[in-house]
Amino acid sequence: MADDWDDNNTYTDLPLNYEELEEMENEWADRYQEGGDHYWDVVPPVSTGHLDRFGSGYRLDSVIDAPQRIRQLYEMCQHDRWQTDRAKCFYRQAQAMADYTDDCPEIANFNTFRPTFADMSILQMRSYFTLRTLLRQGRHPEAALSYLQVYTYETLMLIGVESPKEGLAILSDLKEHYGRLYQQMGESLSRWIKDFVVYYGMEDQKERCFALEIASDKTAMALANYTKLSDDTFFIIMEPLQKYKIKEAALYKKHPADTRIVAGRTLKAAATAMERQYQCPFDQLCLGVRRKRYYTMFDNAVFHAGEKKGDEVFEVSPRRKYVHKNGLWIVDVFAEGYHSRVRETISEVLHETDRQLRDALGVKNKIKSRLGDRHLQETIEQVVSDYMKEKAEAARPKIEVDFSKLARIRADADVVRDALLADEEKREVETAEETATINDVEDKEEVKKSQDLQKSEAEPSAPSFFTAEEAHFLQLLMSGADWSAYLRSIHVPAGVMTENINGKMMDELGDIVLDDDGSGPAIIDDYLDDVKAKMA
């Protein structure tokens, strides 16, 4: 057969020389039996990559001296090497070693993507279980990222963990102590901790683990009902979401309350205008439309579910929930992200509000307009103008009238008037009162009855403590008679009579005995016996 290759002779395979191969095999066997190191020339003493089953720094004594359970795990990995379900094999291997501990004095290096026991050498297996023993004791040894990832995968599957609550504590501890050292691990744990809470239905932990998501959903719900919010509250919700930071501007530093109210009103006006323009609710313009999408639990982790989960729903908030159905996870959320131009427009509205309100309040450092929408400019101008009118109206002094005291004021005025009128004027007034309305006639009849009562009763002798007028006034109060007519007849205002009596009793009791709640003076019940005693 020709050895040279050409276009007409493309098959050049030659028969093997089996005698030569047998001689080579015998030579290798002789060298191994002699105890020489030539046998190992065909196997590099240092790891060269993923397929080296012995790992870096392999020593034969690490295999010979390895504990029996480590050798068994190694054999399991060899047996499962060609299995297609890598995660399931890892789960079964991890269960077999769930309670194993080790104290290997030497920790081998270990670095691979999505590591499992199948990627470890004997020495690396012992190194991992030594580190895991320390971690389970609450210690935090220096460890390669791949070792920590294997421990995380085991915890996600509750290997060696009594309850999901304990597993969550372990994951949180790993994030706290190793998340900054290994940024990739910290980011992954942030996602996996939330997945862990959902997967194991930990309702009592969602407030803590989904705090940011719940706060965002509450904001979305508020935006959905922005017309019911106060101007100040709407501004507080919207301001952190915008590029233009109006709180850092000179206007807000000098007039924070005015800025919040006016900006809240202009933002509401802009929200209404954008809803009409885009034909979409404002909350969806800001935070995205509602969507359902398939979700991978513990993405990029080596995870196998030990038991099949039934259909279930885990609701984080009314706007965010996870659904497990037919073995698949679906997340029902509002996809984040602003509608095109919405965020920019809202920031321009805040900037224009800042500009116009500066002019209205006389704040220096003028700024130029950025808002290109003429309609919104005019709307902001109207809002600022209306607010300044409200502010001016609120600054005017207010006069308040206590209508409950009008009756008292009228009675005192009548007494003063009667005292000033001459006899002839009195007769004219009396004639005029006789031709007044029916209510006035009834008042005069009451006055006449009071006068008749006065005539029928002997005028009390003046006691030593109260004057005759004061005593008779108190007697009318106690009997419920018309004391006001009596005071008018003696030309003494009710306030003067009350003050005189209270002044005398203050010296005796240290307190007043007459009080006026707006309907006229009355004797305080606690001091009725004291008043009677002074009148005796």
Image: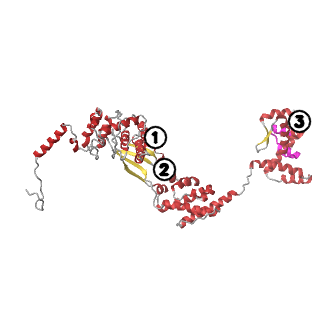
**What is the crowding at mark 3: few (fewer than 14 residues within 10 Å), some, or many (at least 20)?**
some
- Whether residue 72 sits left or right of residue 197 in the image: it is left
- Whether residue 32 sits left or right of residue 292 in the image: it is left
Q: CA distance from mark 1 to mark 2?
A: 17 Å
Q: Which residue is mark 1?
A: 205
Label 3 is placed on what type of residue?
Phe
- Whether residue 422 sits left or right of residue 399 in the image: it is right
State yes or no: residue 484 in magenta.
yes
Q: Which mark is residue 240?
A: none
Q: CA distance from mark 3 to mark 1?
A: 79 Å
**Is any part of residue 181 visible from this angle?**
yes
Label 1 is placed on what type of residue?
Gln
Viewer-nearest residue: 151 or 536 = 151
Q: Nearer the viewer, mark 3 or mark 1?
A: 1
* Residue 462 placement: quadrant: top right
Looking at the rendered structure, the secondary structure element under dot 3 is loop
- Which residue is pictured at 25% across the width and 42% down the height? 81
Q: Which residue is mark 3?
A: 465
Stretch in magenta:
471-493
Q: CA distance from mark 2 to mark 3?
A: 77 Å
- Which residue is pictured at 29% across the width and 36% down the height? 62
Residue 226 in the image: x percent, y percent? 53, 54
State yes or no: residue 231 in magenta.
no
* Residue 151 placement: quadrant: top left
Label 2 is placed on what type of residue?
Ser
Residue 490 in the image: x percent, y percent? 88, 45
Q: Nearer the viewer, mark 2 or mark 3?
A: 2
